[in-house]
Amino acid sequence: MTMSPYEVVRRAIEFQGPERLPLRFATLGLNDTHGVGWNQIGTGNHSLRETTDEWGCLWVRSEMANMGQVKGHPLADWNALDYFRWPDPDDPAFYEGMEERFAGCDDKYVTTGIFMLLFERMHALHGFENTLADLYLERERIEMLADRIVEFDLGIIRNISQRFPGRIHGFSFTDDWGTEREVFISPKLWDEFFKSRYKRIFDAAHEQGWHVWMHTCGKVNAIIESLIEIGLDVINLQQPRALGIEEIGQQFRGRICFESLCDIQHTLPFKGAEEVREEAHLLLEHWATPDGGFILSDYGDGRAIGVELKKKQIMLDAFLAADPYGNVKHRASLRLSFLPKKCDR
């Protein structure tokens, strides 16, 4: 009997033997997951040069289409705390229209999440250099800021779980933590300051029966062990060459589920078809196990990294050909598994 998309994803995360490689590849019409978002403004309307998110952070974009970056930090000066308006996770406006977003979830794995969960939200509010410096210079204030953000995140989780009990399977978030060389701060400081705060959030999601998915950029090898210890289920890594494919596999294969693809900086934009195929095989060899542990996901904005659909198709075919759970015969039948069905989850 063919597994549902939900079951394929769940079994990959829990190392219980999915029958094929789980896919999050919407640009080519293949997606085992379905996202149900709340009304987070996030980066805002990308057609506008400037937008402001729900925290009051100003996003600015260049002439080239892009998500932009935060240029206006409302808490750059701690004196602004006197009049800063904190967003309220209990505001019902955040959740209006969510019910309709379950439409089309079929029998897929359903996710919700928070963009810029903790560290990214801290430096969006206070400024990147300010945040790093004040981990040492203004510990009481920076702890207050982190804790206020955590309380907001917990409130979002509480509200979504109460409104849609049993209908969400995974909680995803973003927090970029490294350069191409190393984590932004020492692993010791990360454990001291951030580990317990992330654990509070992870525990809250797990209490609802949700898996926790994290996207993080950079060479974050030094904090993956800590993330596993506090219960991270899936880690989205899009720069496997920077991390070291064999190195990561030797340390963490079989201990956490990887969501990844060929390197978006070094391989997909600049290498040919053969190199893409080789890297796909290498990733599955070192990061996947026969029981699960790997989800293939796309980088949605191919234009931003100079990757056309043809290159994405080459990568997809390469991963399917090397599928450690099923085999190449699934390629012909994959699209059939994504035909609309009644959503009963």
Image (cartoon, rainbow, N blue to C red):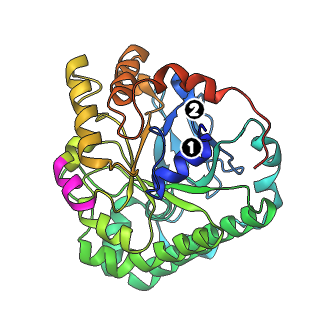
Label 2 residue SS: loop
Q: Which residue is mark 2?
A: 46
Q: Is residue 251 magenta?
A: yes
Whether residue 243 sits left or right of residue 216 in the image: it is: left
- Categorize mark 2 by other alpha carbons within 10 Å: few (<14), some (14-19), many (20+): some
Q: What amino acid is at disc 2?
A: His
Residue at 73 percent across and 55 percent down: it is 167
Q: Of all residues shown, which one is farthest toward the bottom?
A: 140
Q: Is residue 182 magenta?
A: no
Task: Give the x, y percent position of residue 245.
Answer: 21, 46
Q: Is residue 79 above or below residue 125?
A: below
Q: How far separated are the C-alphas under marks 1 and 2?
A: 7 Å
Q: Is residue 343 above or below residue 176?
A: above
- Categorize mark 1 by other alpha carbons within 10 Å: few (<14), some (14-19), many (20+): many
Identify which residue, 119 or 187, lies in the foreground: 187
Question: So how many labels did they put on this image?
Answer: 2
Residue at 59 percent across and 27 percent down: it is 47
Q: Which residues are magenta?
A: 246-252
Label 1 residue SS: loop
Q: What amino acid is at disc 1?
A: Thr
Q: Which residue is mark 1?
A: 43
Residue at 20 percent across and 24 percent down: it is 275
Where does the N terminus fall, quadrant-wise? top right
Task: Give the x, y percent position of residue 69.
Answer: 45, 43
Which quadrant of the view contains residue 156? bottom right
